[in-house]
Amino acid sequence: MTDYRLITLSPPEEREGIADRYDLSHGEVIVGRSVKTDLQLQNATISGRHARLVVSADDCWVIDLDSSNGTAVNGERI
């Protein structure tokens, strides 16, 4: 079984670097600024419903939910 972690990065105009780290458990998590998401991130570059994270024992899938600024995984836009 693999452990997965979401690491958010601050944009350069704010304070470039690691902002927060979140350990992910198995299942599905919706990430965004909205209070209706499972993991709420307060950052102007994050959409209300930004991405869906699906975690299983051996895989972690990141699905962009048509966010305004896009989503990157390990520095690569998806």
Image: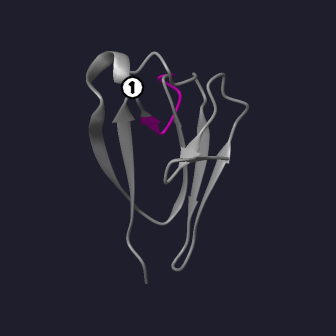
The one nearer the camera, 25 or 50, is 50
Around disc 1, counting alpha carbons within 10 Å, would you say few (fewer than 14), some (14 to 19), or many (20 or more)?
some
Q: Position of residue 31 (x, y in %)?
A: 52, 38
Q: Is residue 9 left or right of residue 52?
A: left
Residue 2 versus residue 51 in the image, above or below: below
The one nearer the camera, 50 or 39, is 50
Seen at 46% across and 15% down, the residue is: 44
Q: Is residue 5 left or right of residue 26?
A: left
The one nearer the camera, 68 or 39, is 68
The verdict on residue 33 being magenta is no
Report the residue that reaches farthest toward the right. Answer: 66
Residue 26 versus residue 33 in the image, above or below: below
Name the element at disc 1. loop
The verdict on residue 36 being magenta is yes
Q: Is residue 61 left or right of residue 1?
A: right
Q: Is residue 59 left or right of residue 20?
A: right
Q: Position of residue 60 (x, y in %)?
A: 56, 65
Seen at 47% across and 23% down, the residue is: 35
Q: How is the image coloured?
A: one colour
Q: Position of residue 61 (x, y in %)?
A: 62, 60
Report the residue that reaches farthest toward the bottom. Answer: 1
Seen at 26% across and 23% down, the residue is: 15
- Quadrant where the N terminus lies? bottom left
Which amino acid, by three-letter code, is at mark 1?
A: Pro
Q: Position of residue 23 (x, y in %)?
A: 33, 57
Residue 38 versus residue 48 in the image, above or below: below
**Residue identifier under label 1:** 11
Q: In which quadrant of the rendered view does residue 72 lie? A: top right
Which residues fall within the magenta stretch? 34-39
Q: Main secondary structure of the magenta part?
A: loop
- Give the number of marks: 1
Seen at 66% across and 22% down, the residue is: 68
